[in-house]
């Protein structure tokens, strides 16, 4: 089946973009055009989804399991909500607590990828998470540490490719984030956006374009 399956949080769900213009449908259209094949998608993006919740869903939710079984390739974009939940710990400066939080996140993220690997040996692509608050040094450090300590090792563990979303957004947050304001954590955004953390229309397109080189080859193979 020519299908892309995506698991993730509100960004995967398409927040910040008009209907059918989130990165998942955009990626599907780009891929279909590039390989000249009809391609469908299943999008399991949900607002607030953490890697802990994803691991559970891949164990107990039949629909989510089916999405992995029927995919030609699987993409994961998750971790922002994990990081938000751990912000008080990461900012506490207590080294032992920070290490425990990172290890717990790494365990949950890796467990999610291992569950997908148990369903399919098809290509698996994970995206790094970007920092929506580049004017806040602590946010910059926290996102970088999460990518380096959680996402990259988990991807290596299961042989997944890594789409460098963080790199694609670096220095471009003002043009790629919906309602971007000052870039300071906690500050309200523009145009009534209380929390300017989601990609805008252009940001979703950039995420799709960043995933594309890792996804399209799956549909070129016999």
Image (cartoon, grey):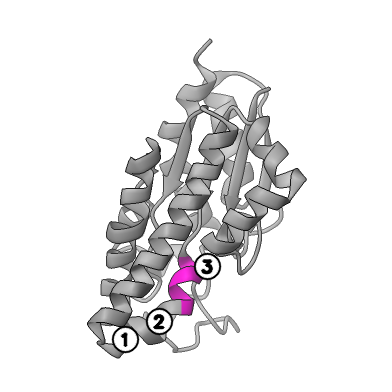
Magenta residues, start to end:
80-85
Please report whichever mark, 3 or 2, sits nearer to the chain's N-terminal start.
2
| Front residue of 116 and 222 | 116
Res 35 → quadrant? top right
Q: Are marks 3 and 1 in contact (CB under 8 Å)?
A: no
- Position of 75 compared to 40: left or right? left
Mark 1 lies on a secondary structure that is helix
Q: Residue furthest top?
A: 222
- Tag shown at residue 198: 3
Q: Which residue is mark 1?
A: 91
Classify mark 1: residues with Cα within 10 Å, few (<14), some (14-19) or many (20+). Answer: few
- The answer to whether any part of residue 23 appears in the image is yes
Please report whichever mark, 3 or 1, sits nearer to the chain's N-terminal start.
1
Give the CA distance from mark 2 to mark 1: 6 Å
Mark 3 lies on a secondary structure that is loop
- Tag shown at residue 87: 2
Mark 2 lies on a secondary structure that is helix
Give the CA distance from mark 3 to mark 1: 22 Å
- Tag shown at residue 221: none
Classify mark 2: residues with Cα within 10 Å, few (<14), some (14-19) or many (20+). Answer: some
Q: Is residue 200 above or below residue 34?
A: below
Q: Position of residue 121 (x, y in %)?
A: 51, 27
Q: Are marks 2 and 1 in contact (CB under 8 Å)?
A: yes
């Amino acid at each position: 089946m020519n299908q892309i399956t995506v698991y993730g949080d509100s960004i995967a769900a398409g927040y910040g973009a008009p209907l059918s213009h989130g990165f998942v449908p955009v990626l599907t259209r780009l891929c279909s055009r590039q390989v000249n094949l009809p391609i469908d998608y299943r999008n399991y993006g949900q607002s607030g989804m953490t890697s802990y919740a994803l691991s559970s869903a891949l164990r107990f939710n039949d629909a989510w399991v089916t999405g992995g079984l029927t995919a030609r390739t699987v993409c994961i974009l998750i971790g922002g909500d994990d990081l938000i939940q751990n912000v008080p710990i990461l900012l506490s400066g207590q080294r032992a607590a920070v290490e425990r939080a990172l290890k717990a996140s790494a365990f949950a993220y890796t467990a999610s990828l291992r569950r997908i690997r148990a369903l399919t040996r098809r290509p698996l692509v994970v995206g790094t998470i970007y920092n929506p608050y580049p004017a806040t040094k602590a946010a910059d450090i926290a996102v970088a540490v999460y990518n380096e300590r959680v996402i990259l090792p988990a991807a290596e563990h299961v042989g997944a490719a890594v789409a460098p979303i963080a790199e694609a957004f670096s220095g471009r947050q003002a043009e790629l984030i919906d309602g971007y304001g000052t870039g300071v954590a906690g500050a309200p955004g523009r145009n009534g956006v209380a929390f300017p953390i989601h990609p805008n229309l252009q940001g979703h397109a950039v995420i799709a374009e960043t995933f594309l080189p890792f996804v399209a080859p799956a549909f070129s193979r016999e």
